[in-house]
Amino acid sequence: MRVGLCGYAGSGKSTVFAALAPGARSDRGGVALGNIKVPDARVDRLAAIFSPKRKTYGEVTFVDVGGEGGRADTGAFSAEVLQHMRNVDVLVHVVRGFDNPLVARAADPARDEALFNDELVLHDLQVLERRQERLRKESKKGPEVAINERCVAQLEGGQPLRALGLSDDEETSFVGIQLLSIKPLITLFSLSEAAWADPAQGSLRELRERGPFALSLGLCGAIEAEIANLPAAEQQEFLVGLGLGEPARNVFIRAAYRLLDLISFLTAGPDECRAWPIRRGTVARKAAGKVHSDIERGFIRAEVYRLEDLEQLGSEAALKTAGKIRLEGKEYVIQDGDVVNYRFNV
Ligand SMILES: Nc1nc2c(ncn2[C@@H]2O[C@H](COP(=O)(O)OP(=O)(O)OP(=O)(O)O)[C@@H](O)[C@H]2O)c(=O)[nH]1
Ligand SMILES: [Mg+2]
């Protein structure tokens, strides 16, 4: 999963990036990329039984899309920044909630949220109006024309496409078309130390639903970045001292998973115990393709069991004897936490 941190100049993107992806590197394009492991106790629990050579967690890549082109005064992102935004699965709008001496205008989260929304909407409107024109010239009829029209109407009303809640089928008519306001959005209020500590600002901090495929939450980037870059042993102490249960990174990852409706299935063996993130509702055969395309092609069946049963009985052999391993076909809908052994033939 690629998560793009975007927002206007000096809004705190790079600080939040340092908090979410400590020790990250920059790629050749000058964009900072940071991969982090998604903490998953189930992988550790499997590893306690299999003692595998390696443990592999889900991974999230954070992209700091940069801000040189994003100016709160004109509200126009550069073409380069927009391109980076098109290449992510989730947009995070980092909204400045602190006064930055380098930015002339005072912090105004509502203003920046509205500007950001308008910019995405305008971008998509231009794309879809051009498409509408082309469809008309080609005298195309059918669902893609109707969906395009519906989306244009939504955008003309100033509303983002994500709020339309298009079905997967409807969205496939946009394959290859790069839209921005359709992407899931997390609005991240980057608060000053004082605002963050102020109980009256509590509603900004907590995780809130903001309509379909949209959430908001608040954190103090400066504090979180400091915590994230402490040695692990000291982090805990620091968190407790601040009355925080866990780093904002964990809250943030859960929010992103929820927004994308991601769950994980697990694979386990002496070589590797691993979590595989998939969309909820994915069937066994399609999920197999995550592991390897050969397994999807040559799918025979999925042998599925629950981690709790394994922990109770101690081994896969014991599970088998007890009849706790289910044989599932290609249409089986994978459940969160299923441990899966694929049988396949190529
Ligand atoms: N008080 C306070 N200052 C912050 C916080 N986060 C960032 N800053 C300061 O705000 C300034 C800009 O922060 P950055 O993280 O560089 O912002 P940015 O969005 O990456 O900036 P550009 O990439 O230039 O657009 C820096 O001087 C930070 O130290 C915060 O949580 N509290
Ligand atoms: Mg920056």
Image (cartoon, grey):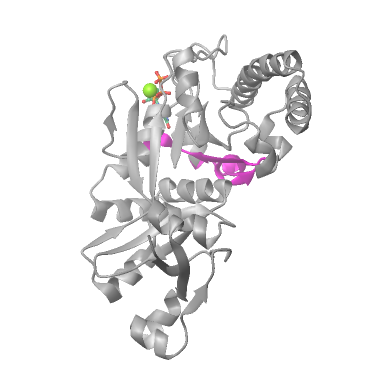
Q: Nearer the viewer, residue 238 or 180?
A: 180
Q: Quadrant of the C terminus?
A: bottom left
The residue lying at 51 percent from left, 45 percent from top is 256
Residue 80 location in percent, x, y?
44, 16
The image quadrant where one finds ligand 1 is: top left
- Relative to 80, say whether 259 is above or below: below
Residue 182, by quadrant, is top right
> Would you say 167 lies left or right of 329 here?
right
Query: Does residue 322 sit above or below 170 in this rendering?
Result: below
Q: Nearer the viewer, residue 137 or 236?
A: 137
* Residue 116: in magenta span: no
> Could you say where residue 189 lies in the image, as x and y percent from the top left?
53, 34
* Magenta residue check for 204: yes
Residue at horizontal 47%, vertical 84%? 324
Residue 317 at x, y percent in the picture: 34, 85
**Residue at 29% over, 27% down:** 27
Residue stretch rendered in magenta on the structure: 197-223
Left or right? Give the position of 234 relative to 137: left
Examine the rendering and report whether any part of residue 245 can be seen. no
Which residue is situated farthest in the bottom direction here?
321
